[in-house]
Image (cartoon, helix red, strand yellow):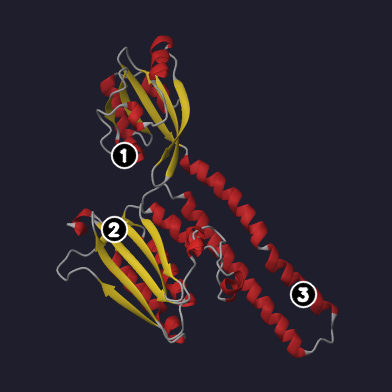
């Protein structure tokens, strides 16, 4: 028996109690389209303050006049698929059922996870088959050459083995990044519920990467824009994913910054209870025409340079999807021949924003 079948036999009061137990979203709506009840799952799916709003306001681009009239007359449920687009697109199967002569139940079953899984599966297969073909072809070619020449000089053999080692490591990095990207894409519609201390994350990532920067004679400088007696800045999130964001951005700054330059990492309070995490390097900069595409998977401004530095072309795509999952924003600014800044904006927890 489905939740809608169980709802059909309940009184209005019982439906409201039943809604508290549901993982699916549930609304009660009058035939005048006014929402009289929304369970917590519906509020998470569609936003707060649903009660007393019109159904057509919540489900934009859907006309309910004829639907409600037919439900009231024929007493048959009506179903449709609805995509709700805010910062993240979510997909629901929506079922309307008449409960009485004045009330209709609206059940929302979240199809986003299944849609994401299907998309990730298709993308993963396409990406693996395309991006692994080149290093695999290279490896096969070197193996065949070495097997065909028993008298190959040792220095040439060592050279070939070095290339094979690099190609195999490149494939490993690529697969690791594809798995990370697939995971965050699948869960992008689910807001994490841990509390993350942003300053602690940023300082720990800087500590991890400072030796790598030092090998390029670069320094990483941290700037804390919060006053000393302010609450510890915290966000609602997944700590490991926030670490991954900061690691990717600072590592990119090291890769593409000029030797003997500095990298500025800033934590800045912004208006409306936001926190900005900014990473700026001194380097060649990025042409304006490339910036909108930097977060596309496998998009590289300079393919040869990116591969030489060990890039997979997925780092900023991972950053974008993690930031989306945390209901944040990513922006990029650059000045040719001078600097590039990556700014991630997250909503602060209310206690930290006050």
Q: Position of residue 216 (x, y in %)?
A: 46, 85
How far apart in space, not on screen, are marks 2 and 3 (Cα)?
50 Å
SS for tag 3?
Answer: helix
Based on the displayed image, in which of its 4 quarters is residue 267 positioned?
Answer: bottom left
Image quadrant where residue 129 sits:
bottom right
Q: Nearer the viewer, mark 3 or mark 1?
A: 1
The reply to whether the C-beta atoms of the residues labelled 1 and 2 are less than 8 Å apart is no
Question: Residue 282, position in %: x, y?
Answer: 42, 77
Vertical arrangement, residue 329 with respect to residue 223, above or below? above
- What is the CA distance from the residue labelled 1 to the residue labelled 2? 19 Å
Choose between 109 and 291: the one closer to the eye. Answer: 291
What residue appears at the point 28 percent right and 20 percent down from the top-left corner? Answer: 12
Q: Nearer the viewer, residue 156 or 284?
A: 284
Residue at label 2? 235
- Image quarter hosting the N terminus: top left
Which residue bears the numbered disc 3?
Answer: 143
Question: How dense is the environment of label 2, judged by Cα within 10 Å: few (below 14), some, or many (20 and up)?
Answer: many
> Residue 96 location, x and y as percent?
40, 23
Of mark 1 and mark 2, the one earlier in the sequence is 1
Distance, label 3 to label 1, CA atoms, is 57 Å
* Contact, mark 2 vs mark 3 (Cβ under 8 Å): no
- Quadrant containing the C terminus in the rendered view: bottom left
Question: On the rendered structure, is 303 left or right of 40?
Answer: right
Q: Which residue is mark 1?
A: 47
- Look at 33% across and 27% down and name the residue there: 55
Q: Residue furthest left?
A: 229
Q: Of helix, strand and loop, which one carries label 1?
A: loop
């Amino acid at each position: 028996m489905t939740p809608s079948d169980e709802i059909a036999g309940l009184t209005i009061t019982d439906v409201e109690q039943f809604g508290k137990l549901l993982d699916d979203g549930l609304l009660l709506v009058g035939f005048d389209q006014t929402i009289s009840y929304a369970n917590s799952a519906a509020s998470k799916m569609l936003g707060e303050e649903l009660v007393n709003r019109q159904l057509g306001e919540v489900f934009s681009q859907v006309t309910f006049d004829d639907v409600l009239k037919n439900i009231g007359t024929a007493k048959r449920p009506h179903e449709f698929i609805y995509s709700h687009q805010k910062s993240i697109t979510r997909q629901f199967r929506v079922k309307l059922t008449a409960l009485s002569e004045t009330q209709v139940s609206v059940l929302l079953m979240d199809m986003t996870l299944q849609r994401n899984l299907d998309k990730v599966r298709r993308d993963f297969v396409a990406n693996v088959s395309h991006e692994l073909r080149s290093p695999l072809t290279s490896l096969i070619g070197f193996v065949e050459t070495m097997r065909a020449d028993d008298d190959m000089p040792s220095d040439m053999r060592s050279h070939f083995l070095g290339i094979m080692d690099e190609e195999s490591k490149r494939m490993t990095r690529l697969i690791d990044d594809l798995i990370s990207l697939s995971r965050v894409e699948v869960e992008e519609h689910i807001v994490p519920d841990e509390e993350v201390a942003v300053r602690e994350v940023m300082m720990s990532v800087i500590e991890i990467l400072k030796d790598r920067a030092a090998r390029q004679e670069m320094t990483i400088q941290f700037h804390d824009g919060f006053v000393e007696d302010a609450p510890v800045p915290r966000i609602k999130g997944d700590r490991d994913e926030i670490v991954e964001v900061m690691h990717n951005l600072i590592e990119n700054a090291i890769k593409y910054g000029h030797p003997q330059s500095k990298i500025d990492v800033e934590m800045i309070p912004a208006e409306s209870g936001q926190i900005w995490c900014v990473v700026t390097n001194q380097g060649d900069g990025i042409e304006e025409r490339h910036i909108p595409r930097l977060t596309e998977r496998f998009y590289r401004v300079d393919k040869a340079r990116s591969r030489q530095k060990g890039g997979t072309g997925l780092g900023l795509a991972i950053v974008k999807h993690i930031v989306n999952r945390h209901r944040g924003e990513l922006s990029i600014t650059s000045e040719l021949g001078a600097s590039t800044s990556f700014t991630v904006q997250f909503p602060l927890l209310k206690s930290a924003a006050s």
